[in-house]
Amino acid sequence: MTDITDDIAEEITFQTFEDDCKLLGSLLNDVLQREVGAQVMEKVERMRVLAQSGSNMRMAGIEDTAQLIEKQLASEISVMTLEEALTVARAFSHNLNLMGIAETHHRVRKVRSVPHLSKSCDDTFNRLIQGGFSSDKLYDSVCKQEVEIVLTAHPTQINRRTLQYKHIRIAHLLEYNDRPDLSHEDREMFIEDLAREITAIWQTDELRRHKPTPVDEARAGLHIVEQSLWRAVPHYLRRVSTALKKHTGRPLPLTCTPIKFGSWMGGDRDGNPNVTAKVTRDVALLSRWMAIDLYVREVDNLRFELSINSCSDKLSKLAHEILQKEKASEDRHESWNQSLNRSQSKPYHQQALALPSQLPAGADLPSCTECNDGESQYPNLEIPRTDYVPQNRQDFLSSDFSSTQNLQKASGNGVVGSISKSTSSNNLQTGATPRSASFSSTHLLAQRKLFAESQIGRASFQKLLEPSLPQRPGIAPYRVFLGHVKEKLMKTRRRLELLLEGLPCDQDPCDYYETSEQLLEPLLLCYESLQSCGSGVLADGRLADLIRRVATFGMILMKLDLRQESTRHSETLDAITKYLDMGIYSEWDEEKKLEFLTKELKGKRPLVPPTIEVAPDVQEVLDTFRVAAELGTDSLGAYVISMASNASDVLAVELLQKDARLAVSGELGRPCLGGTLRVVPLFETVKDLRAAGSVIRKLLSIDWYREHIIKNHNGHQEVMVGYSDSGKDSGRFTAAWELYKAQEGVVAACNEFGIKVTLFHGRGGSIGRGGGPTYLAIQSQPPGSVMGTLRSTEQGEMVQAKFGLPQTAVRQLEIYTTAVLLATLCPPQPPREEKWRNLMEEISRISGHHYRSTVYENPEFLAYFQEATPQSELGFLNIGSRPTRRKSSTGIGHLRAIPWVFAWTQTRFVLPAWLGVGAGLNGACDQGCTEDLKAMYKEWPFFQSTIDLIEMVLGKADLPIAKHYDEVLVSPSRRELGAELRRELMTTEKYVLVVSEHGKLSENNRILRRLFESRLPYLNTINMIQVEILRRLRCDNENHKLRDALLITINGIAAGMRNTG
């Protein structure tokens, strides 16, 4: 069963799903026959038949026979050669991936074929109108909705990007095969194309051989925008607008964007020393470059479409002005070219002196004209530049960064890949070799001549395409006007290239776009012109889509959040206060800290002396705030403080931010770009969650802070709650209840001071880290916690699963919109009576105590965890840039939540999601509260969703497989601990079914259960192979072939479970 796309799990039928699985499996078998031979294929098929038989027996309840078959399977695997085991693991892993592709494809197909789709905008708006909400209320609520989906670089995406792309191509082929008009020849070509893709997949190395850098991770996020979200967003907004118009009579305003996107990729430095201030700056500039490049492509398409002559007087006037300027510029070009040609016969020094030294202000300069070796007596020549880029332009540049010519090739291959050379290793050059070093004076003149000739040729060709103004009575004004927009975009793109190269960039601000408002202005002018001339049908097509993209993605696609741990800020202030002989900041009590911070925040002078010398870690924090001041809110979103526990944690960041902005604005001689970043405390541990409400209340009671929030952040306080660390700290059930109460406390505190609140949910992919269906999660939040605003993270494999295809992305965006709308207008019911809250407290207390006594207090547990799971080997995966531990400790406390959940998911024990739950429910039932629990499940959305998620994850657990890991890998002295935990799993299952009143696990989602059962033959086999490889590897730790085989099994299990950590 999958944690990934359960929002649309009901949107699949098995009518053709199994046919596609058989087709893909058959083609994979054909590939294997060719690649590995018939003898190996026989062994692969025998493993599949044994595993299928064992699964069938177990599902039929014939346990004894199932055990015999599984023992036979394990026995045959134990005597396999490494090459044979690797082939079987790879074959079954690819089979599971192909089944996942077919599953996603059929969900998309079902969405298309259903006339009235549940949770869609049309369905939800209709329900609200029928429920008594006025059309004005509905319209205002949708238009004011602010949802931000934040993509993170959490290391849970296990597939290489090259394989992800091949999987996407197979999905497109399956979509093509659904066409009813295909001929027999078309079908044959489809089979051939599918076989080619599967062959390429088999022949591709599945493993990452090097750890990704933070820039690599950011590039992966940008690829999601380019390949999917760029297409999905306009489609999604059209759906919202159409549904609004149908039910309220008014479409969605053109620049209204209910959903935007943020990113942590390149900004999340919490425990990741590889994310530096320079990385953040480079990623922000890279994102802006990609945004501009995408806009250039769209404007080009728009120019082709808008060939009409009819336009408003204002646009006509502007188009004529542009043409007149171009005409004047062309005349100067011709005059200059003639002068250049006449001068070729003169001595070199006379030639150069005869050339003009200046041309119109604002003209771009080609690279060759900026060279000056300091010895030549001849002045630099400023040559006007158009869109044309010389073929040997790369010869002009001396830095590592790709040339504009190479970057322009991105339109076919994906922009980010074209600049990977300079960014993937995080070593973008801060300077460049002087261009004069590459050219002699003679070479310089030759390059100028080549450039001039290229301009002559281009100008002549351009005249054939677009005659000058006097030669035509009517012009295509939109093409002219948008051509000017494109030229300005290209100058913006070139400016960003120079900034990434670390080269001087002194363009006139009028020559490039800095903000989305500047780009929207000419586009909206075109839209209004078309509407005024009766061409609204054209205005509402590609142009409206582009306007909506600009409103959604802005100039950076996804604003970058910064995240750092609170102790790093305390260490920085320690260094500052020591330097100023004020004492040691971290040793002060909370009141003294607040007094000091508030006083400094009210002052107008910088706190940090420019001459201060600090440790590298402290300097990195100061550099990060400086970069934040330079980039501003046009590029950055929020500053998130992880492990926040006090009001001083927030004010410390506010002070460091203020100080950096004062320093940067003083150097620039002007205010910093944009406003101050939102400072967002992240409450993660149970202790901090319990204190969240009082911390926010304390913050808002400080006059300076409250006025700052009202003045600079529109009266909005943002608070983040963390699901991963709270779950690892106390177990899933206790964490869920503490998160619920923390949100209630934060909302109450903000309401006391009349401040609006936006809750930022740090949800992981797996249920053990707060994952699960988006719709269910939003609908079960505390009343009043979702008031039209929401931020939520999407991590790792969830990003690809939910947003990797445009069709699934559109559906997910709709689900976010409708779930937030319903939670705002029809808030979930609170606990019906106080007894329910008291009962939750008791269950939580028992559950949390049992969890902690097992995980943190049992001296044998850590060793058992390390033996029974592949946790120690997960570091070989190279799936993330950050270390697996926050600190160099072997204990579970400093282990990150992702490898903690990841390891248990691999063994199919999924312990973090259920440990302690059975003890808590058992305790409540023993107190005679069984009927109360049943009533809570039926009437309280939060409790129901919590139980449903635990039931869902119990359906993915497999006791025989978990027992097999123990029997082979765990020391005899610790096997009793494993047996005890398995008994507790059975207890948890028993009491979950008592509360839900289901006859068996996942009875309320049979399609989901059937999907998971179809994967079991492959999944069980890979688990058994993993156990055998772990046994061998732990006797031969340096065997790299064994290590590769283990990583293949980890990939396969992740594919079968459909999530990792």
Image (spheres, grey):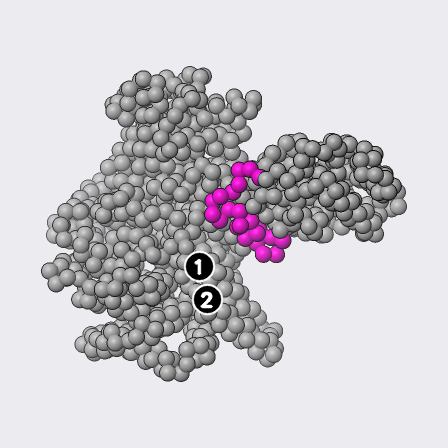
Report the span colored magenta: 409-432
Which residue sits at x=59%, y=36%? 503
Task: Say above or below: 560 vs 598.
Answer: below
x then y, percent, for residue 1023: 29, 67
| Mark linked to residue 160 | 1
Of residues 769 and 446, which is closer to you in this image?
Answer: 446
Compared to residue 976, the image places residue 847 above or below, namely: above
- Could you tell me which residue is drawn at 54 percent across and 29 percent down? 673
268 is within the stretch colored magenta: no
The label number, if any, that marks residue 204 in the structure image: 2
Mark 2, residues whose alpha carbon is within 10 Å: few (<14), some, or many (≥20)?
few
Name the secondary structure under disc 1.
loop
Q: Look at the numbered discs 2 and 1 and tell me whether their residues touch, using CB distance below 8 Å.
A: yes
> 486 and 85: which one is in front?
85
Does the rendering let one see residue 740? no
> Measuring 30% from the left and 40% from the top, which residue is drawn there?
684
